[in-house]
Image (tube, helix red, strand yellow):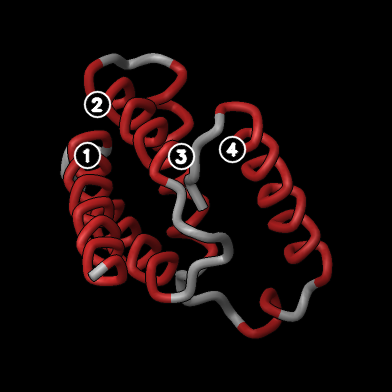
C-alpha cells in the first residue's frame, strides 16, 4: 500500500511541476517542448530520491516565476534557453569540442549550487 501511495505522490508531483512550469514559461512554444522532455527524463531516471519538501519549494519558486517578472522568471527563461540549445542539432565539429562540454559542466555546477542554496530541484 505504501508503494502505491508513493507512486501516486510522484505522479501528482510530476503533474504539479509540469503545470506550474508551463505557467512560468507562459506556454511559449519552443520552451514548452524543452520543458516536457527535460521533466520526463528527470522523472524517468531520477538522480536523487523523491523529496516532497524540495518539490513544494520548487513549486513555490515556479509560482513566483509565473506571477512576477523578477529573478525567478529570468532563471527559468535562461534554463529553458540553455537546455534547448544543448539538445538542439549541433554540427559534429562542435559536439566534439571540449570547450563546449566544459561550459555546460560549469553551468550544471552553478545550477546545482543554486538548487542546494534554495532547497529546490530544477535539473
Q: Nearer the viewer, mark 2 or mark 1?
A: 1
Above/below status of 96 relative to 80 = below
Q: Earlier in the sequence, mark 2 or mark 4?
A: 2
Dots 2 and 4: beta carbons under 8 Å?
A: no
The first of marks 3 and 1 along the sequence is 1
Q: Residue at x 32, y 34 (%)?
A: 59
**Residue pointed to by mark 4:** 115
Which residue matches tag 1? 20
Return the x and y of residue 107 as percentages of the image width and height. Answer: 68, 47
How far apart marks 4 and 1 lie (CA) works out to 17 Å
Separation of residues labelled 2 and 4 (CA atoms): 18 Å
Compare residues 94 and 119 and report the one nearer the observer.
119
Q: Secondary structure at mark 2?
A: helix
Give the structural element (helix, strand or loop) at label 1. Answer: helix
- Give the mark nearest the N terminus, 4 or 1: 1
Q: Is residue 27 left or right of residue 41?
A: left
Amino acid at each position: 500500500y505504501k508503494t502505491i501511495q508513493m507512486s501516486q505522490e510522484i505522479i501528482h508531483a510530476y503533474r504539479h511541476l509540469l503545470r506550474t512550469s508551463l505557467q512560468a514559461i507562459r506556454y511559449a512554444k519552443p520552451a514548452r517542448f524543452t520543458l516536457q522532455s527535460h521533466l520526463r527524463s528527470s522523472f524517468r531516471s531520477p538522480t536523487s530520491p523523491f523529496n516532497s519538501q524540495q518539490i513544494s519549494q520548487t513549486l513555490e519558486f515556479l509560482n513566483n516565476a509565473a506571477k512576477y517578472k523578477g529573478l525567478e522568471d529570468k532563471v527559468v527563461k535562461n534554463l529553458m534557453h540553455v537546455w534547448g540549445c544543448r539538445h538542439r542539432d549541433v554540427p559534429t565539429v562542435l559536439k566534439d569540442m571540449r570547450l563546449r562540454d566544459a561550459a555546460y559542466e560549469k553551468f550544471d555546477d552553478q545550477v546545482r549550487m543554486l538548487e542546494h542554496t534554495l532547497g529546490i530541484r530544477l535539473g
